[in-house]
Amino acid sequence: MQLGMIGLGRMGEGMVRRLLKAGIECVVFDMNAQKVGELAAAGAEPSGSLEEFVGKLTKPRAIWLMIPVAFVDEMIARIVPLVEPGDIIIDGGNTHYHDDIRRARELKPKGLHYVDVGVSGGVWGLERGYCQMIGGEDEIVKRLDPVFAALAPPVEAAPRTPGREAIAGSTAEHGYLHCGPTGAGHFVKMVHNGIEYGIMAAYAEGLNILRHADVGTKHHEKDAETTPLKDPTLYQYNFNLADIAEVWRRGSVIGSWLLDLTAKALLKDPDLDAFSGRVSDSGEGRWTIQAAIDEAVPAHVLTTALYARFSSRGESTYADKVTSAMRKEFGGHSEKLSAGI
Amino acid sequence: MQLGMIGLGRMGEGMVRRLLKAGIECVVFDMNAQKVGELAAAGAEPSGSLEEFVGKLTKPRAIWLMIPVAFVDEMIARIVPLVEPGDIIIDGGNTHYHDDIRRARELKPKGLHYVDVGVSGGVWGLERGYCQMIGGEDEIVKRLDPVFAALAPPVEAAPRTPGREAIAGSTAEHGYLHCGPTGAGHFVKMVHNGIEYGIMAAYAEGLNILRHADVGTKHHEKDAETTPLKDPTLYQYNFNLADIAEVWRRGSVIGSWLLDLTAKALLKDPDLDAFSGRVSDSGEGRWTIQAAIDEAVPAHVLTTALYARFSSRGESTYADKVTSAMRKEFGGHSEKLSAGI
Amino acid sequence: MQLGMIGLGRMGEGMVRRLLKAGIECVVFDMNAQKVGELAAAGAEPSGSLEEFVGKLTKPRAIWLMIPVAFVDEMIARIVPLVEPGDIIIDGGNTHYHDDIRRARELKPKGLHYVDVGVSGGVWGLERGYCQMIGGEDEIVKRLDPVFAALAPPVEAAPRTPGREAIAGSTAEHGYLHCGPTGAGHFVKMVHNGIEYGIMAAYAEGLNILRHADVGTKHHEKDAETTPLKDPTLYQYNFNLADIAEVWRRGSVIGSWLLDLTAKALLKDPDLDAFSGRVSDSGEGRWTIQAAIDEAVPAHVLTTALYARFSSRGESTYADKVTSAMRKEFGGHSEKLSAGI
Amino acid sequence: MQLGMIGLGRMGEGMVRRLLKAGIECVVFDMNAQKVGELAAAGAEPSGSLEEFVGKLTKPRAIWLMIPVAFVDEMIARIVPLVEPGDIIIDGGNTHYHDDIRRARELKPKGLHYVDVGVSGGVWGLERGYCQMIGGEDEIVKRLDPVFAALAPPVEAAPRTPGREAIAGSTAEHGYLHCGPTGAGHFVKMVHNGIEYGIMAAYAEGLNILRHADVGTKHHEKDAETTPLKDPTLYQYNFNLADIAEVWRRGSVIGSWLLDLTAKALLKDPDLDAFSGRVSDSGEGRWTIQAAIDEAVPAHVLTTALYARFSSRGESTYADKVTSAMRKEFGGHSEKLSAGI
């Protein structure tokens, strides 16, 4: 089996290295020639141009794009004139599934196949394997099976779900899944990330509550703008968050891989001074909410987790000013700029 | 009718002035002697000490406290030795109704009556009248009726609710209401303020969305940390928020007194540069949520409006740092400090 | 001034009647011939077909559509062949502003003008006047000014905002506003409705908390599946919600038109037995959230208010089942079907 | 080492069995004599009355209560007359940490020690080990170390956190942790459960969105009460949720023990027909929010997850009726009882 990979960033590079280890032949291309060189040293077939890249691929070609979502359509437009009917373009990036559906529709008359793959695993994928959620035509997805299998984590990565032994034909416990027709892969990955936002926010909020459990030791002003803390003796705790995250990793109900990473980060830097708290979002969280709304399904947690990221970037400031302005108008309240709680 | 008023701040002063206009005799006391003097000039009976204040009141005495909530118990402790069975203590401040129930229980064996009054109207009450939500014993509340009636807004302040003409005996359309036994007044006022938080946040969020409707005119970076704005041509609006708040005041579904005030504030200062967006909360919002939770009743809007205030004061920063730390661990994502959206 | 109105439902009929009273000539059309007849009796010019309708309009024609949003594109397609360059099509329905932008773009090459008007006021508009938020070309909007002015509420409908007297040229205090280019009207109306959802939910949640303030009088089971109510004596209130909504109407901070309506509804039916609690949504709330997300602006309150409607229709049931299934797996918890709180 | 255990329900029984395996001597008591007999058969020392139970314990006694939270104070009151200064009472149930602080204060003058232990692990603890979060006096907690160690999961239960090898003296990676003074154990457990609610809701919401991804295949009415689904072709997916939960278990960012259990539940019953969706809550979620509010820390996700449980039990119905009543008043909207989306 052979795969062409365009895009050798954090994710693309790791995937090529994992494929090479599994004996999949990889032809690689990236605007960064140094990256191409590094992977050539690791056994990949390098190419210096898109033309050279396409030329080195065996027909029917399988071309995997692992590039920022904003450049995918442009790249497909450059690829299309170089390839032939029967070839496959795979988008493994963080694409909105709407775009998958559009692209498959556009490529079909040209005889080109389109497969969307939602890939989870982050920078750890090279080591742990990549969880893959796949959308596309049955036969085409089946053709790529060796690639998906090589990228995926081993079945031993998690204990077997009771009852799974009786189920034949699903690759689910092998870490990759053909979820449905075009767009299904990115749809499932989108919701996966939506859930990820929610879980991250759950831990973050909980740890924040533990962090402030010493609030009874702080000074509280007695004025009309400050809520008195009824019983300060109830908030006298100085918790060791690194130890708490660690203890939850074994035997508790909230053990998870994200908790493992949190325990690691807190051990290194309990106050998280290396961070300012400005959190980016890369689209899937937003699209998940859009889907929830189109479906008329409530998604309180996933939405509020997304909004927390917006707020962390200062996007609620004008709303807060409006609230302050109203308080000034009806109650003559001036903003209290000191650190009162 | 005579009333003793302790506390001549923004609210207390306005109430005394309104009572005096209505012919209610007022004995006043405040630690600020100048305030006492000003109200004496307006016709109130001044007193220089708590003892003098109590001495000037006709028995059975009616003493209204309009002081910061943190000082109420202390003040009651000072009053108790000076008064006699049959006297009434009224708390008109932002008291948690739990404290009302406790105090009434403590004062009862001494033959003292306790009335709780939630007062809404802010600095506008002197002019508009004060909406009063009252809790306490039937007979005692009835005894104070002239005071409540004098403080309340006129029935003409709002068009009559169809069907109200047929209802006798309720003071509801006169702007004051005996809501129930001890604590009922502050319970209803507490929920009133909880609703207030929600309504304020609804306007604030909506205006924030209008404010950012020009986002399509801003530069967006194309990288893995930034969600692309799919169609910038949909966000090219520069709205005049003062005009929009104004137009909503007549004929729309969302007309309200808070909107009137918002329109006024936006007309003076459309960018709200006078405010930083740091919003205080004075307790009722928190107690409303506590009640909702004790009752097992969902209160998504009221809670999230309260949390927006906490966040406006930076209290979510550690949670945001935890989220950033997780992203760093699983995806190698560094925080993006530039203003990308 | 003359206007052609297509669609004589609740809103369209009221608008025609208000226009006629103001001396605006109205040509009307509806699939329901009886409605056409009723309005003819009120002074409108009836038409039995779209062709007749267009034929009766003076050039340049002004055609206002007041029909369900799902039929607007179809109707425009039928109108286009009948009209001429310079004619105006006005959409006054609950249109997504994206569609306004698309339609204006499509009609422009034909020399047709498109104006979008967000109309608030509901069934009360005939009496109170309609608040109108308008998007479109300056000159065209100006041409329609007599229509907007006739539909709008009188300036006396609300007290003047201090400072407004000094502002010339804005129609904002006359109840209608040209908010910006195409789509601006429906954008502002969309956010208006988003805010409306939030305000409604704030009242609804608060009243629900008051309603359950008797929870301490109910039986609580003592088992591992039920949270004990710590102090039942704190929840012994039986509130009269109709009176409470009424008392808030005068002098309080949360007075509003929606509160007026709530007081009216609660007076008629305090238990609201006429309703099941299944709440529809008609699109604007959803689009508001979509805009918030595109703008990366948090909208916790508006979103959660929308989701409450989805939940009221049973759309969270599968999620709830998932939660129950997890509890069963990790804790052996069976669902508790009795009414325990 | 010897431990007395009162309460042999799901949790208590499992703990005794795990202790016995580790060679800890256990004296047991329960109102259910059969349970006592079963554990006697497994090697525990049975007792038929509280007096007998206390009599069989070596001094200084260590008595662990594993009973419903509503009965703990009563049980302590019965134990106190039977024990002696220096004895330890351990509460391992789902206690509010406020009660821990109160009890330790009450027991101190009697020379009795109180230790609070938050135990996570559910019905799986016997097999996996119990994660324990402990609060109390240093020396007393140290004395009980063999018990905690025996109950805890093995360190091998999770891969070592990088950097942990260098840390001496913390038991965190051994699955139990002395978190701080009295109440600290239940405080941390409380927040643990708050986080648990959030994580569960994140999965539940995400799976619900996947479940409704076929909404484009359903009929949508075209009327003013129904939001049209703009592009039904985007929602044509029939996802296999059991397979999706399974595929996420390996290599993805959202792998967790709760996901393992979800995958298991969905494999058995993909439609979750065994559940109605009525979700209980047992207190910790509520107390977590109360702590967040006392600390003035936002907890959007944890709160909304709790409220989802309240709503699942019909507690939002009156609020929904209020919303319907408002819609009827301002727009003449009747509730739409058919299944329109």
Image: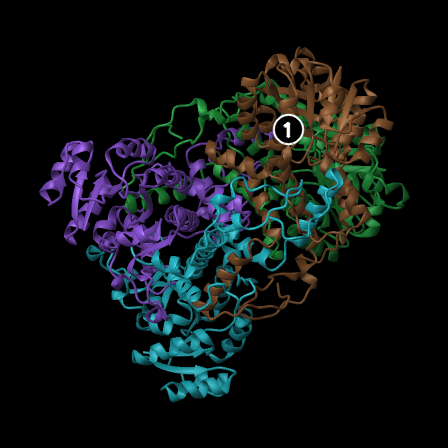
Chain colours: A purple, B green, C brown, D cyan
Which quarter of the picture shows residue C14?
top right
Image-based side of B92 in relation to A12, left or right: right
**Placement of A36 over or under C175, stated as above or below:** below
Q: Circle 1: is it few (<14), some (14-19), or many (20+) Cα within 10 Å? A: few
Residue A162 in view: yes
**Placement of B71 over or under D34, stated as above or below:** above
Q: How many marks?
A: 1
Q: Is D106 or B133 nearer to us in this picture? A: B133
Q: Which residue is mark 1?
A: C78
> Which chain does the numbered disc 1 sit on?
C
Residue B9 in view: no
Residue at (55% x, 63% y) in the render: D280
**Placement of C1 over or under A209, stated as above or below:** above
Q: Is B29 or D319 nearer to us in this picture? A: D319
Q: Position of residue D62 (x, y in %)?
A: 39, 75
Residue lying farthest to the left in this orientation: A41
Q: Position of residue C223 (x, y in %)?
A: 56, 71
The kind of residue on which mark 1 rests is: Arg
Q: Is B234 or C12 nearer to us in this picture? A: C12
Image-based side of D49 in relation to A58, left or right: right
Image-based side of A198 in relation to D23, left or right: right
